[in-house]
Image (cartoon, rainbow, N blue to C red):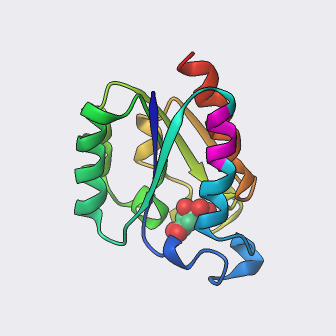
Amino acid sequence: KTVYILNGPNLNLLGKRQPEIYGHDTLEDVEANCRKVAGEFGLDCVLMQSNHEGQIIDWVHEAREKAAGIIINPAAFTHTSVAILDALNAFEGAVIEVHISNVHKRESFRHHSYVSLRADGVIAGLGVEGYALAMRRMGSLLA
Ligand code: DQA
């Protein structure tokens, strides 16, 4: 089984962008950690990042055929995108939403997530470790 790890805008800069909030690890580090955990559960994973909402929607549609689960950090689209929510509602597998920072401790516009209306679980504020923990949960959900 395959798990898609989808990342939204500005996360290509992870490791360089506001390291005091998001840390020094890069998306490549995230992918390596997730791959290790996925391997423990006999899962495959594919990590993707885009700054474009439509691209993320297209990957969610692709996941309908190709993935059993989606780990998604929609970044700023979390708080704005009904379209990503609708796409996830058309996906039948497991969905875990991840935020590196604790969005609830930040500006009030980050407190609401459209994606949480669909997510089976949400992780926030555990740093990039949140992705590996989400993958561990995928391991039990998809067993
Ligand atoms: C984020 C939190 C969002 O509010 C923000 O727009 C991001 C990253 C996080 O991982 O903490 O870009 O999703």
The magenta segment = 34-39
Report the residue at 41% width, 28% height from top.
Answer: 68
Quadrant occupied by the N terminus:
top left
Residue 37 sits inside the magenta stretch: yes
Residue farthest toward the top in the current orientation of the protein: 143
Report the residue at 45% width, 66% height from top.
Answer: 76
Position of residue 130 measured from the top left corner of the image (x, y, whole percent): 69, 48
Instruction: Decide which of 105, 13 is in the foreground and name it.
Output: 13
Residue 102, quarter of the rendered image: bottom right
**Relative vertical location of residue 64 with respect to residue 105 in this rendering, above or below:** above
Position of residue 136 measured from the top left corner of the image (x, y, whole percent): 68, 32
Q: Is residue 137 left or right of residue 2?
A: right
Q: Is residue 2 left or right of residue 25?
A: left
Position of residue 65 measured from the top left corner of the image (x, y, whole percent): 25, 32
**Relative vertical location of residue 62 with respect to residue 78 in this rendering, above or below:** above
Quadrant occupied by the C terminus:
top right
Report the residue at 55% width, 79% height from top.
Answer: 13
Report the residue at 77% width, 79% height from top.
Answer: 20
Instruction: Decide which of 101, 25 is in the foreground and name it.
Output: 25
**Relative vertical location of residue 53 with respect to residue 63 in this rendering, above or below:** below
Residue 117 sits inside the magenta stretch: no
Q: Is residue 76 left or right of residue 125?
A: left
Residue 108 visible in the displayed image: no
Q: Main secondary structure of the magenta part?
A: helix
